[in-house]
């Protein structure tokens, strides 16, 4: 997971974004009002008492709200390219560029419901808020079950309590999400990767919030499903081979600026450079290369290439 400056998204918003959002909310509010009118009319026709009418109105409005918001998925979908640009087309959670969805946007705070809180209506008021959007691949955002892992964020949004979740637009609890957020620079430091390609907490204190947050995120974002784990392990093996080969060449007296050594360095730079569209899992690659930071030529490369 690499840090994404969410403020940079604002600079890329389409000129008509505010109008598009306003139009979406006008549609949603109209559908809710229509549902309330229809429910009230039905209540009068069937002679509901005040308590039942209030309950039916609440249910009808809630259903209409969710249905109307869901029908406007093209609003957040229209920002796919803007969000993808921030990570060079790679998933903000796992850094893979194998996106298998036409609308790869996750609402970090779920818009429809919260799996961990049965009475939460979902963060419906953030449905069209670009600050709540995360560019996500299908594996991170959809429910998956395999032999060795299960995951998929879906409607999950666990928090450390207290405080509680914000359940209305008026609530102002300082929520403490139990999921890593790529737009939080501190969160991006909480993951590590072992020699077998497994994502692990970058913290050994199992009682700490940081450890629990990493563990929860590894499961929810499906970070250790088989092919992903093997792909990271293959990257580590490739880095080890390139470093060993370069060291051998240097020890043999081959000039540091020779084509052979330059070729090796070029391959390593591709692996750790987030802007390289041909590679993925760049953060893991950088951590693996950092194991050789005692070598001057490796340290120079790490210092030169942006994180």
Image: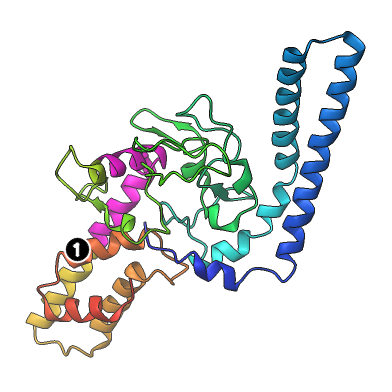
Residue 23 in picture, x, y percent from top left: 79, 54
Task: Determine which quarter of the picture holds residue 46.
Answer: top right
Residue displayed at 37% across by 49% down: 180
Q: Visible in this render: residue 74?
A: yes
Q: Residues in magenta?
A: 212-238
* Rendered view: 233 above or below 257: above
Label 1: which secondary element: helix
Q: Is residue 228 magenta?
A: yes
Crowd class of label 1 (few under 14; some 14 to 19; many from 20; radius 10 Å): some
Magenta: main secondary structure: helix
Viewport quadrant of the C terminus? bottom left
**In the displayed structure image, the side of residue 148 where residue 277 appears, left or right:** right
> Can residue 133 be spotted in the picture?
no
Q: Is residue 99 above or below residue 122?
A: below
What residue do we see at 77% from left, 62% from top? 19
- For the residue pair 150 and 207, the one nearer the viewer reads as 207
Is residue 257 or residue 65 the one in the foreground? 65
Classify residue 149 as left or right of residue 18: left
The answer to whether 55 appears left or right of 31 in the picture is left
What residue is pinned by disc 1? 240
- The image quadrant where one finds the N terminus is bottom left
The residue sitting at 48% across, 58% down in the picture is 97
Of all residues, the one furthest to the left in this rendering is 251
Q: Residue 67 falls in which quadrant of the image?
A: top right
Residue 34 placed where, x, y %? 86, 33
Nearest the eye: 257 or 136? 136
Residue 276's x, y, as percent? 43, 71
In this picture, residue 142 sits left or right of residue 189: right
């Amino acid at each position: 997971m690499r840090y994404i400056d969410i403020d940079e998204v604002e600079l890329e918003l389409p000129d008509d974004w505010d109008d598009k959002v306003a139009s979406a909310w006008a549609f949603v509010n109209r559908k809710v009002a229509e549902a309330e009118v229809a429910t009230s009319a039905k209540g009068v026709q069937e002679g509901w008492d005040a308590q039942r009418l209030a309950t039916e109105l609440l249910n009808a409005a809630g259903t209409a709200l969710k249905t109307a918001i869901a029908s406007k998925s093209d609003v957040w979908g229209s920002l796919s390219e803007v969000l993808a640009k921030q990570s060079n087309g790679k998933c903000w959670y796992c850094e893979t560029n194998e996106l298998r969805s036409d609308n790869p946007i996750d609402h970090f705070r779920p818009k429809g419901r919260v799996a961990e809180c049965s009475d939460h209506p979902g963060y419906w008021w953030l449905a069209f808020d670009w600050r709540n959007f995360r560019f996500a691949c299908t594996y991170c955002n959809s429910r998956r079950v395999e032999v060795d892992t299960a995951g998929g964020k879906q409607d999950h949004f666990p928090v450390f309590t207290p405080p509680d979740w914000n359940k209305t637009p008026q609530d102002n609890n300082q929520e403490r999400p139990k999921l890593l957020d790529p737009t939080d620079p501190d969160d991006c430091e909480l993951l590590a990767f072992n020699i077998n390609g497994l994502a692990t907490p970058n913290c050994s204190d199992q009682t700490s919030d940081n450890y629990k947050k990493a563990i929860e995120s590894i499961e929810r974002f499906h970070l250790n499903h088989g092919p992903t784990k093997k792909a990271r392990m293959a990257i580590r093996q490739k880095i080890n081979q390139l470093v060993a080969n370069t060291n051998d060449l240097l020890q043999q007296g081959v000039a540091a600026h020779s084509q052979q050594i330059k070729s090796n360095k070029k391959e390593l730079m591709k692996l750790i450079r987030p802007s390289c569209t041909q590679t993925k899992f760049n953060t893991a690659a950088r951590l693996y290369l950092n194991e050789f930071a005692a070598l001057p030529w490796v340290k120079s490369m790490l210092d030169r290439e942006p994180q």
